[in-house]
Image (spheres, helix red, strand yellow):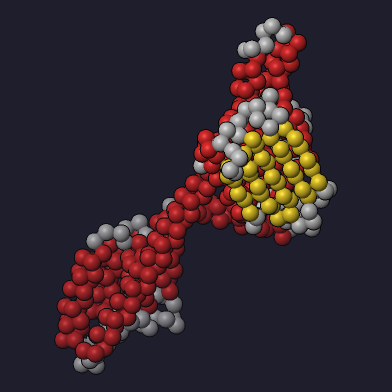
Amino acid sequence: MTLQGARTALQRAGQVWHRLDVMVRDLPLGLLFLAACFLPGVRGQGTEMGGLPTRPLDELAALALALECLPLALRRRWPVVCIALVSCGFALDQLRGYHSAASVALPIALISTGSYLDHHRRTTVLALTAAYVPLAISLSLLGSGGETPAGFVTFYLVLALAWGAGAWLRATRAAEAERRDRVAVETRAAERTQIARELHDVVTHHVTAMVVQAEAARYLTAAPEKLEQSLTAVSDTGRRAITDLRHLLDLLNPDHGTGGREGAGDGGGAGPGSSGPVLGSGAGDGREARTPAVGRVLTLVEQTRRAGQPVDFTEEGTPPALTGSADLVAYRVVQEALTNALKYAHGSRTSVQVRHGEREITVMVSTDGTGSRTAAAVGSGRGLAGLRERVGVLGGDFSAGGGPDGAFTVRARIPVARVS
């Protein structure tokens, strides 16, 4: 058998083992201690309290050994039953003077009880302490006086330490479970926020353009050629929205990226005006499989112009081949600003300026809006808040606000993350 085959066999054996009931998995531990009691080298080498002489194993010893070892199979399923039976076996072992190696099972049972017992923990501790006192007194009276009270107290502290170790394990396990739950809640919240942001980016721009174009088509019934152009623009924008939504849904699909649906649902590409949503791209993770280049902003500008918004576009510099997530964020800035211009300042002249530098991309979109109404309407929106967060994650600067002349300007400086 090859090394890989052996590793696979071990993995399958481990999976089968973990599927077994917890009592079945704990039983071998008890059987191991029971078998060790009959080994010549460890016979009579167990815990010795009270100074009683060691007695050879007899029929009653079998009961004591069984009570001490076999209940370990219950240590996680029924820890109280386990510690009760093991304690009875330990008491019988000491009172009869067998001093078997099975006495080691008592601290293990205490650790397990302290670790897995969820209810009545204090009552269990008090009951075990109450049972230990008469056992210590009986052993002191039956023994030859070789065990001092300090010895009994010391052994009790050892047992208390075993319980404390189990309690520490329980607290650690609970803290880890709480941490995982907290991380899961935070992860779900972050995913919902990211999905909402992507849906906003993908849907809002296209739907806004469609609404504006459809409203304009109502007044073009006397001009069939312009009406046809307007309806064609609405249809094209709807197709882009559907394509972008398919891309987003593919990313939300658990099987996305496994090769099972490669290229499915994209219709051969989103077209030059596609926004190509990428979940998590705002975090700078460098995934650019569907990231649009800033050069596609021109097509976005053309689409906005067809919706009836006069837009002047200026682009300076040459975008580098790899920019991390900076080009997607720059695209989103322009997309959100043009969407707001269509919503709140339809028909007002808008200018888009994109400048590519060696270390950063600078974007400025300015609209001759309608004064304070425009600034108030877009200044507190989800889109601008999401853009501010995206730009901030990449270490850039973002601002959006109205000027004294009523114009509304969005500015963003986005550092370029070089990808080697």
Residue 95 in which image quadrant: bottom left
Q: Quadrant of the C terminus?
A: bottom right
Residue 304 appears anywhere in the view? no
Query: Which residue is painted at 72% across and 24% down in the image?
Result: 306
Quarter of the image for the N terminus: give it.
Answer: bottom right
Residue 364 drawn at (x, y percent): 69, 45
Q: Residue, x 62% and y 23% (percent of image)?
A: 212
In the rendering, at what x and y percent does residue 237 appear?
Answer: 68, 24
Which of 393/265 is in front?
Answer: 393
Q: Is residue 391 visible?
A: yes
Vertical side of 58 occupied by 390: above or below = above
> Which residue is outermost to the top?
222
Q: Is residue 127 left or right of residue 220?
A: left
- Farthest residue to the front: give it: 405
Name the residue: 49% across, 46% down. Answer: 189
Q: Residue at x 70, y 55 (%)?
A: 415
Expressed as whole percent of the image width and height from the top left, the position of residue 292 reads: 74, 40
The image shows residue 170, relative to residue 99, as above or below, that is above
Toward the viewer: 13 or 44?
Answer: 13
Above/below status of 371 relative to 225: below
